[in-house]
Amino acid sequence: MGVTPLPRNKILLLLLIATVVALYFAFDLGRFLSLDALKSQQAAIETWRAARPLSAAAIFFALYVIVTALSLPGAVWMTLAGGAIFGLGWGTLIVSFASSLGATLAFLVSRTLLRDWVANRFGERLRAIDDGVRQEGAFYLFTLRLVPVFPFFLVNLLLGLTAMKTRTFYWVSQLGMLAGTVVYVNAGTQLAKIDSLAGIVSPGLLVSFALLGVFPLIAKKLVEVVRVNKIYAKWTKPRRFDRNLVVIGGGSAGLVTAYIAAAVKAKVTLIEKHRMGGDCLNTGCVPSKALIRSAKFLSHQQRAVEFGMRRPASADFSFAEVMERVQRVVAEVAPHDSVERYTGLGVDVIEGAAKIVSPWEVELTRNNGATERLTTRSIVIAAGGRPFVPPIPGIEDVGYLTSDTVWTLRELPRRLVVLGGGPIGSELTQAFSRFGAQVTQVEMAPRIMIREDPELSELVTQRFRAEGIDVLVNHKAKQFVVEGGDKILIAEHEGRDVRIPFDAVLVAVGRVANLKGYGLEELGVTTARTVATNAFLQTNFPNIYAAGDVAGPFQFTHTAAHQAWYAAVNALFDPFKKFKADYAVIPWATFVEPEVARVGLNEQEAREQGIAYEVSRYDLDDLDRAIVDGEAHGFIKVLTVPGKDRILGVTIVGEHAGDLIAEYVLAMKHGIGLNKILGTIHIYPTLAEANKYVAGVWKRAHAPEQLLAWVERFHAWRRGAAA
């Protein structure tokens, strides 16, 4: 996908503007918009205005709009002329509306001609700017308009490239430019006494304007102080605190938050009411990957002939023993997240329930029943999430499993229905199928793994079906019934009901944040689907933060740990220093086979967002190590800025995709392009060589053909051959 050429209407607009600007400079029309010209013609202009006041006002208004809309020099002199010709009152009125209208037209011209080009070239950076403009754009535009030392035409053109609404730009400009307009129009009423701009814009006046520009920032801070005081008005702030920080939740986000606090010698208490390590250790990442490893071992035995064996191998296994091994793995990893370890690191760990009773107080109920209250300067909510169970009629009657409860199974279901085609549903679908269950995966969307590119979804679907999994897409679960002792799921597909008998159903349709049971509602912490936070991970109570699944927007263990750094540092060092959470480069992986990993944009998202891109693709069936390992399948697909090697996103499908993606995560984080990856030595034979080869694909597509043609002639000349 390349850069889209300009539409005809845009080309015509550009030519029209270029022609007018060229004529302006070719005929030196700017000489009429100078101080000397205005002073020399003041009497004649005044006579003309007196004879035709309405025509004079209309013509002056139109000329001012044109000059401003085209960003031509002369707006300052026209403002002076407005005062000289029409006086302070009418001059201010005419100039104020003309300048705002002209600025808005310049804003729209910039948006029409350049916004798409800038979005295609700098999509990711522009999205971040757009987010800031939506939140604070009007405020900062108002501040800039109050300071006339900043070129207004640049403000018009640059903001036209952003997502600011036109009406917002207009009314803020109208209001913000009023003070400067009055000063210049008033100066124009004294035009005969002015010899240069210095007579108007003295150093003292410039300082005054600068202070005026700073005023909104001060006012905003004061408003924020008032707002915060109003939030805290119901409670009395303690004079002293027992803790610098209390962390609620001992999962990934909570553990990292507490670790950082202890590392910088803060006094921190971590409260966990269930099991240390949270979902990741106990019911998520660790047990699922242990189960997948055992399932993969079985699948490899069935492929024994591929590796030179005379006949397929088989393993005598007990599903119950496999699940016991999963628990042994969890127990082996558990010390990394244990009470003992974190206590040794300097964290005060309390096993029990927490309830926030004021912005600075947390009530603790230990597992032994003892209660106490702690005062704390800051609180970090890291309460995690849980599987979402949709309210499908009959689901409670048939019983169901989730990613939390499936680990209690010790008997393999003969027929298993998995509701959900996302990462969790897909991973467990394949794993249970490889143990011998007859698995039906039911997904209401047109394909499984809907966030990935269609070709990737299709590749995984084909693999699932080849392994005997019944993948049903466009099937919406309507009802669960029990008939004659049989459990049946009734799903709607293309307007008709499909009956799917099963012995167990695993619900894997997503997760929801844990928002109840620890005081958020009583305190008044703002929540929606998650705890609402700002860019600094603060809730509506500035000393209460949230991180991890409970805060979103990503429900990954590594993202929770990433957020925890920001939550901890901001909670401990605000107002002296705080940082906005950075979500610019977020990788993830789905551990099905073939494994899927991604960072940044894929083609589906780039098209949806209108971002121009190029694709470089390398198929792993050409890679020596993949061939040797019998894993010659999948691909690496890299999206880059058109004509450049800057990486927009990477998708990898294949063996160890989750490991291979790390090189691209580093590259995107630190602005490393494909050229540098191509120039990096990769060990042979490894799967990582594929990263270099896909960079080579990009390089060949951007080979300097004209230069190579000259080089070919050069070599021919050196051989003595005819060029």
Image (cartoon, rainbow, N blue to C red):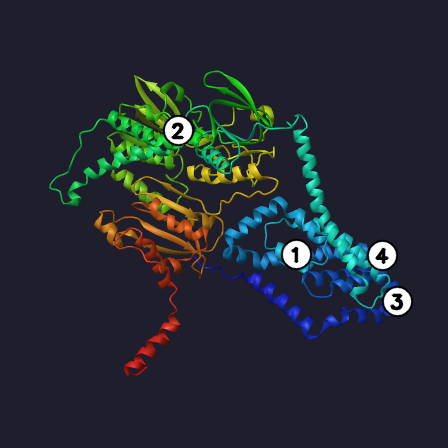
| 360 to 701, vertically: above or below | above
Residue 155: image tag: 1
Query: Split into 4 quadrants, where in the image is the C terminus?
Result: bottom left
Question: Mark 4 or 3, which is nearer the eye?
Answer: 4
Residue visible at 68% across and 37% down in the picture: 225
- Find residue 112 and report its image quarter: bottom right
Question: Mark 3 or 1, which is nearer the eye?
Answer: 1
Q: Secondary structure at mark 1?
A: helix
Crowding around mark 2 (Cα neighbors within 10 Å: few <14, some 14 to 19, many 20+) is many
Q: Secondary structure at mark 2?
A: strand
Mark 3 touches mark 1? (CB < 8 Å): no
**Left or right of 144: which side holds 500?**
left
Crowding around mark 4 (Cα neighbors within 10 Å: few <14, some 14 to 19, many 20+) is many
Location of mark 2 (residue): 477
Location of mark 4 (residue): 88
Residue 193: image tag: none
